[in-house]
Image (cartoon, rainbow, N blue to C red):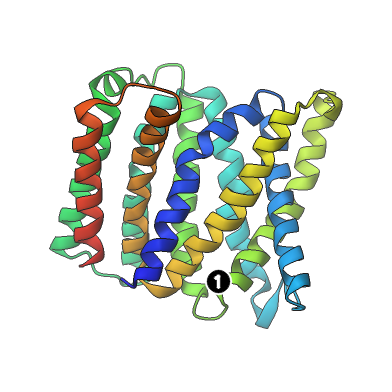
Amino acid sequence: MPTTAIIYLLSACFFWGVSFIATKMALSAVPPLTVVALRLIVSAVCFVVWFAIKERRLALGPRGLFWQIILLSLFGTSFHYSLQTVGLQFTTATNASIYAITGPISIIIISALFLNEKVTIKKATGIILAIGGVILVMGPDELLSFNIKGHLLGDILVLVSIVLWGAFTVYGKKLTGKLSPLELTSAVTVWGALSMIPVGLWEIAKYDFSFALVTIRAWLAIAFLGITCSFLATLFYMQALEKTESQKVGVFLYTIPVITYITAALFFEETSGILLLLGSILVFSGVYITERR
């Protein structure tokens, strides 16, 4: 894997790994679907400004790919973010984090079926090591607190959102041969924002929500989600997809919980311990083995 692709992926996973802080801050003041709509609007504005500065035309349906762009947008933005955000309202963080382990696995299965990417012994070994590392990082208390009872709806929504991200990764890989990562990500994001605006307005009307109640802290959180997590991270992710196999890209997602736990340990003085160290070593060893085939 090219060094630039590794840098792109680690940067994207870092933003996604710390995004839980901003999401919790935003949800404390704004309804979930409205948070999704706002973060996508912020991200779309970033792309529009970028193209304006570069004096380039922003194409929302280029080269006869309109419906494919729309489908990719639903997979990777509207449906993915909405199902994940709403699902977290009905399930526990423990359940969601355990289900997140299935993300790279879904990418492997879908890419093998539709892109003919081979699952080699080294890839499988690397993935198993990474999964083991994530489980170690989570720790026994987290695993024992898993409980599906009363959380079935939320669990299903989170699982579907993870599968949709797998489809987004594989289908996005296919389209990177026809569009540049910048063109593809910008079109997907803008259509995602446009599709979520009416959904956000509906939620605002349903709950009689007033933006006057939104704190500066929540606005900053939404800005962070839009600029770093939806704009930069997704662009970096697509840049990496253009340069390597989707299976290799997918395994990097196992670094997200490690980054999350390390961030919590550094900035929130949460207990880390030997399990975090050992788990991190396993995760990054698994990523290293997989990206080297």
Front one among 241 and 288: 288
Figure check: 44 above or below 82: below
Q: Quadrant of residue 132?
A: top left
Observer-nearest residue: 88 or 66? 88
- The quadrant of the image that shows the C terminus is bottom left
Whole-percent x and y of residue 98?
34, 33
Decide if residue 99 is on the left or right side of residue 208: left
Q: Residue at x 47, y 54 (%)?
A: 12
Residue 205 position in % (x across, y down): 85, 30
- Relative placement, left or right, of 237 versus 121 is right
- Counting from the top left corner in percent of width and height, residue 18 is at 48, 39
Q: Label 1 belongs to which residue?
A: 181
Judging depth in this view, the residue of 273 and 161 nearest the camera is: 273
Residue 12 position (above or below residue 133): below
Element at badge 1? helix
Residue 13 placement (x, y as % from top left):
43, 50
Three-letter residue code for mark 1: Pro
